[in-house]
Amino acid sequence: MPPLTGHQLLGSRESAESSDTFAARNPALGADLEPAFHEATAIEIDEAVALAEAAFDPFRRLLPEARADFLDAIADETLALDDELLERASAETAHPPARCAAERDRVVTHTRQFAEWLREGSWVDARIDHGDPTRQPLPKPDVRSMLEPVGPVAIFGASNFPIAISVLGTDTISAFAAGCPVVVKAHPAHPGTCEIAARAIQRAAAATRMPEGVFSLIQGRSHETGTRLVTHPKIAAAAFTGSLAGGRALFDAANARPHPIPFYAEMGSVNPVFLLPGALKARAEGIAQGFVAALTAGVGQFCTNPGLVLGLESEEWRAFRDHAREKVAAFAPATMLHAGIHAAYTAGLGDRLGNEALALIGHSDTPPSPDRNEAAACLFATTQEGLLADPTLFDEIFGPASTLVTCASPSDFVAVAEKLEGSLSATIHGTEEDLAEHRELVALLRRKAGRLIFNGYPVGLEICHSIHHGGPYPATTHAHFTSIGTRAMHRFVRPVCYQGWPDAHLPTELQDLNPRGILRLVDGERTRL
């Protein structure tokens, strides 16, 4: 593999026009990593977008099989990276190599899944309503529609998944599958990982003869770099995973354009967990073990870590709290992704420790090392009244901290659920009898969260067609859409309707003979005919 250069990758060429550089940093050692990475200039950003715009028409016109071959080639090149990718990702993020390998495997899984989905073809949602020239009082026109790509897409890599939600993540792969060229803004905390991944995509594009400009990577740590990309008039949509502040700033910029574009941001989420009486009676210790494992997974740096846990005052609830406290105490502090996230976590804990409504009831027995950007796990406790009296307690703390909330009656569950903001997930532990007795709570959570989990834990997403990773604001900017799973393609397409068109000039998916054999809605009936 070629050595890292720190350059912009613009289509198939490299560029390093700016003398403004920055370095990746090993968060555990506090040491800079080679090489220096060049901040993208306005000219380089414009070139990346111009290349993507020029590639759009030839890329969208490729047969689905050709785009699927491109995705399979990306999966192959990702596997071929082997230790180079894993070692750099581990150095830049302090993720253990096994975690990096799991992310790599997830990339391969979702990329091949999108390739299969492309070949199957029904995702275009083809609809045909045949005309009737004899209809009275007015003839009925022939109307057909399907989903088509929107144009060049900007992708912002996430900090917490340097492989699986970054250059090689579902945002990029789903945009390619939809027929959209991609410009990725690398995350400045792991620019080397991003460059390695980007070169794999470059090789896949060359091997499958994709149009020049189908993919570019730009580096940068300044806010201006991201803003210029998302406000470029030729960018048709953008996707982001990160903080509420960062996502909201880019969302506002996208909507302030003369021609606003959809900006799909996944942001903050508290992911509440409700422990109903039947579950606590049967398995309080087991639930505590699963909860703490979810809380501390990835040093609490998952967007689905459970930040609030609610239970009814009882002997079983007190036992759960004791078990959770013991297991939190056993968590060994570990290095966070970078100094900025560590500083934010430390500040968040400081606010909570100074809050009179909260009690710190558990924490890691081993003190963390600030020099290594380590985080300890912390467990707070309050009552339903204390929670409702302070809206800041509903805010996410990005790290291994959670709050246990004691409720006096089932109506307290409902009162809290009513105050919850949008969340990526909501979890209920209970029995079927519990569900029957808490219908109002379930109904409320269906409005608040994108994924409802029963007797499970929110951390960990199954990569499948049915998964939905989204939720009402502030979890995301568009609750209708997911950033994981094959429905992610729907962010980068729009319906196009054809009225009265000759059959031979229609897209293949809308022609009468259905040459691809896809599932279509024809005169109101699902059929492959």
Image: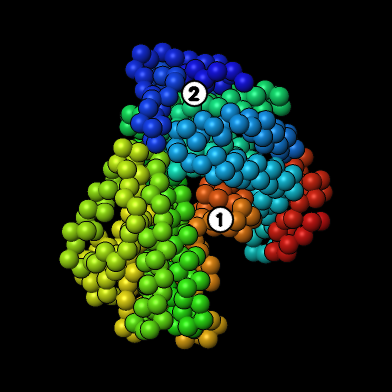
Q: What type is the residue that disc 1 sits on? A: Leu
- Residue 399 rendering spot, x and y as whole percentages: 37, 52
Q: Tell me what residue is drawn at x 77 percent, y 40 percent.
A: 504
In the image, 71: left or right of 337? Answer: right
Q: Tell me what residue is drawn at x 72 percent, y 46 percent.
A: 116
Determine whether the residue tagged by mark 1 lies in a helix, strand or loop: loop
Residue 185 versus residue 254 in the image, above or below: above
Q: Nearer the viewer, residue 355 or 223?
A: 355
In the rendered image, which residue does mark 1 sit on?
Answer: 461
- Residue 302 rendering spot, x and y as whole percentages: 45, 51
Q: Which mark is residue 48?
A: 2
- Contact between marks 2 and 1 (CB within 8 A): the answer is no
Q: Quadrant of the C terminus?
A: bottom right
Q: Which mark is residue 453?
A: none
3D distance between C-alphas at marks 2 and 1 = 32 Å
Q: Nearer the viewer, residue 284 or 421?
A: 284
In the image, 393: left or right of 510? Answer: left
Q: Is residue 204 visible to us here?
A: yes
In the image, 462: left or right of 256? Answer: right
Structure colour scheme? rainbow
Q: What type is the residue that disc 2 sits on? A: Ala
Q: Tell me what residue is drawn at x 40 percent, y 46 percent.
A: 334
